[in-house]
Image: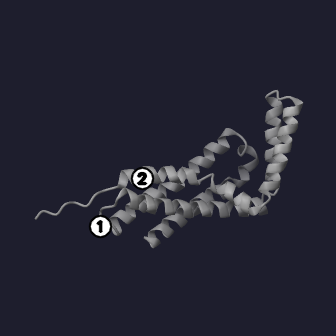
Amino acid sequence: MKKIVITFGLISGALMALFMFGTLPFHDKIVFDKWGFVVGYTSMVLAFVLVFFGIRSYRENIGGGAISFGRAFAVGILIAVISSVCYVIAWEILYFNFMPDFMDKYAAHVIDQARASGATAEAIQKKTQEMQQFKQLYSNPFFNALMTFIEPFPVGLIITLISAAILRKKRAIQPA
């Protein structure tokens, strides 16, 4: 199980990192609008398709064509965790080396949205303080990593549940 989980987890994680690095040149154009979410989560789903193939590989090569939902879930969730950790590592490299002003731009975007929506001066001031606190927290690599991990992992969890349900297969009963 270990070889399959590591192999598929690292390939999935490499794909997510590749997609993330590939969007870096377009960062200022898409990151804060709806297309940033569409591109980001679409690339995650594409990378997490390897969860399905990893479970299927385990079923066919280790399980002799059979796998329980629980075992399929265990294989899939381990692949999703490895992939999500690769995503975190890629983000940490990008954030601290190539985009150190990301939180400044994000905070400005959130405050501009509040102004555009007609928020009061008091609400804008409160939002500014919240963003300053978030920026301070986000400068901590451990907090940054935690927040980054919870971006892709729920997607991996959902794909794992769906894949485990689809791929579960009982052993055929041998005729006597």
Which class describes the residues within 10 Å of circle 1: few (<14), some (14-19), or many (20+)? few
Tell me the tag on residue 163.
Answer: 2
Question: Residue 42 appears at what percent x and percent y?
Answer: 57, 47
Q: Which residue occupies the foreground of this view, 124 or 56?
A: 124
Q: In this rendering, would 105 be left or right of 11?
A: right
Q: Is residue 152 above or below residue 63?
A: above
- Quadrant where the C terminus sits is bottom left
The quadrant in which the N terminus is found is bottom left
Looking at the picture, which amino acid does disc 2 mark?
Answer: Ser
- SS label for mark 1: loop
Q: Which amino acid lies under the numbered mark 1 shown in the image of this protein?
A: Gly
Q: Tell me if 37 is positioned left or right of 167 in this view.
A: right
Q: Quickly name the residue at label 1.
A: 64
Image position of 147 (left or right of 162)? right
Q: How is the image coloured?
A: one colour
Query: What residue occupies the far top of the structure in this picture?
Result: 118
First in residue order: circle 2 vs circle 1:
1
Residue placed at 54% from the left, 66% from the top?
10
Residue 31 x/y as whole percent: 71, 46
Looking at the image, can residue 33 be seen?
yes
- Residue 25: x %, y % from top left: 73, 53
Residue 12 place in picture, x, y as percent: 54, 61
